[in-house]
Image (spheres, rainbow, N blue to C red):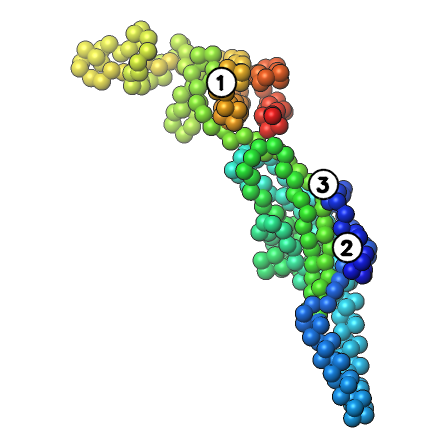
Amino acid sequence: MQTLKSFFSSRKANIPQSEFIILKRHQIFILPTQSGLLFTLILFAMLLGAINYNNSMGYALTFLLGSMAMISLLHTHQMLIGLKIATGKVKPVFVGETVQFQLWIENNKPIIRNSLVWTTDSVLQLKHLSSSHTYINNLINIAANQRVQIEIPTNTSKRGSISLGKFMLYTRFPFGLFHAWSYIYLDMSTWVYPRPLGNQNLPSGQQYERLGTGNLFKEGNEDFMGHRNYQLGDSPRHIDWKAVAREQDWMVKQFTDLNATTVWLDGNTLSSNIESTLSQLCLWILIAEQQKVEYGLKLATHIIKPASGEQHREQCLRILALYT
């Protein structure tokens, strides 16, 4: 327990702590609630009445209620001390999506932690792990020697790195006379990639068309794939002249070439709008990775040699996220 002076002196710059924290006495603050102050005022009035009338029963009731209040003070503090809060998994997202920061609250003592409440800038989504864990909104009860998982959703509006930030855990158990709380700031962050938008055709004339359920095929000269509507600039060699002779719509024959290829995604040749360029490159990376096409990335002074795979994808997307 700490006084107001120690509380305000401890609120220094928000420096992230490690990947987990175990709450100790100096990290927990406690003060009376409005109900606690009113209860104290009532006890004082009862004490004055007992003194005035020299009523032994009045003394006994006043001291009994005062003792119960002091015991509740200890119980309120006990609900937080020794709790372990640890970071869990967090996945990168694209701009506009929601980051889910996963946390674990672990109770390593043989007592039940009742009425723990989390408050952050976002609404908490709690996961019910077993019958020993119950929750109402962001109210958590943790059984002895158990742990519970929570996910804190955070909206994203710009690319880059996003951190969980500071949040608070508090309780007013058992009678609501005292408010005990602790501020927690864990080292937890992830990447926010640009929103994938733009033309789905890969550069260097290697056109990809979307068919059926979303499969992408490279336009080539080997296997006949079907027809599409004629567009200005299409080669006359691919026009279905038989259909034209039958006075049908002008159609163009399409051929597939599924052989592996290598493409360069060059952001230096795109729009001067940096966000549009990054969104286009992001979309190309996803399409190329989906089709197992080896691709390289050029963006200002950044040059990533052609490759493929999850590690290469994350490397390229991270460059887009941090580009300035």
- Amino acid type of the residue tagged 1 in the rendering: Leu
Task: Looking at the image, tell me whether mark 2 or mark 3 is earlier in sequence order.
Answer: 2
Upstream in the sequence, badge 3 or badge 1? 3
Residue 284 seen by the camera: no
Nearer to us in this view, 304 or 300: 300
Amino acid type, callout 2: Phe
Query: Left of 27 or right of it: where is 117?
Result: left
Query: Which residue position is annotated with label 1?
Result: 270
Question: For mark 2, what is the residue?
Answer: 8
User: Residue 102 location in percent, x, y?
Assistant: 64, 45
Rendered-image quadrant of the N terminus:
bottom right
Q: Which amino acid type corresponds to the residue marked 3 in the rendered image?
A: Asp
Q: Is residue 281 left or right of residue 212?
A: right
**Inter-mark Cα distance, 1 to 2:** 52 Å
Give coordinates of residue 251: x percent, y percent.
Answer: 27, 16
Mark 3 lies on residue = 187
Q: Secondary structure at mark 3?
A: loop
